[in-house]
Image (cartoon, rainbow, N blue to C red):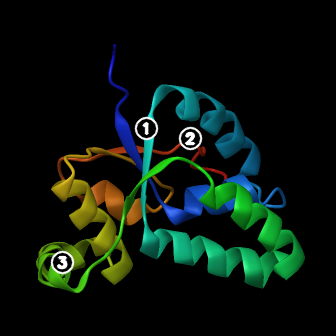
Amino acid sequence: METKPIVFIDSNYWIYLLDKTCDEHEYIANHFKVLYDTSSLAINTIVMVEVMHYLVKRLGTTIAQRKWQLFSSIDFLIGNLEFEELDRVFEVLSKFSHTGIGGRDATILSFMQDNNITQLCTHDKAFKKIPDIEIIDPIPNEIS
């Protein structure tokens, strides 16, 4: 049995997928249909909270609740940020802060490194400056 590659999915990807009013939605929706069948999906709780925040603020609680239930029911490899891991996140942030990576991004990179994940779906250009990860961005450059 072939093992599926593990791909970490950043918050902007989920936001564009779940919010049909975004210009990026169609590109992400088409890409997700293939990705879901060919990869194992990884996420951390920090990204999940960021998506939750967007859904509530942008779409309102009624629509957000339905989208959240769908989103949170996906079978993910989930990273729960523990206090003991913060020194590692600090190291990653310190190493890559010059690239535009922030604290939330450092939690993603730390989790990816700890789990040998090398692929990241994101539209965040700062991640393209990080060595040894493959950025998957199905959105054409001229869109946003």
Q: Are marks 1 and 3 in contact (CB under 8 Å)?
A: no
Q: Which label number is shown at residue 138? A: 2
Which circle's residue, 3 or 2, is located before the other in the chain? Answer: 3
Observer-side mark, 2 or 1, equals: 1
Q: CA distance from mark 1 to mark 3?
A: 23 Å
Horizontal arrangement in the rendering, residue 128 relative to residue 33 (left or right): left
Q: Which label number is shown at residue 40? A: 1
Which circle's residue, 2 or 1, is located before the other in the chain? Answer: 1
Residue sticking out furthest to the top: 1
Asked whether 59 or 75 is in front, the reply is 75
Horizontal arrangement in the rendering, residue 70 relative to residue 133 (left or right): right
Asked whether 103 or 111 is in front, the reply is 111
Q: CA distance from mark 2 to mark 1?
A: 18 Å
Q: Which quadrant, please, contains the N terminus?
A: top left
Regarding mark 2 in the picture, which secondary structure is present there? loop
Residue 144 visible in the current orientation: no
Mark 3: few, some, or many residues within 10 Å (few <14, many ≥20)? few
The residue type indicated by label 3 comes to Glu
Q: Report the residue marked by disc 3.
A: 85
Q: Which quadrant, please, contains the C terminus?
A: bottom right
Horizontal arrangement in the rendering, residue 109 relative to residue 31 (left or right): left
The residue type indicated by label 1 comes to Ser
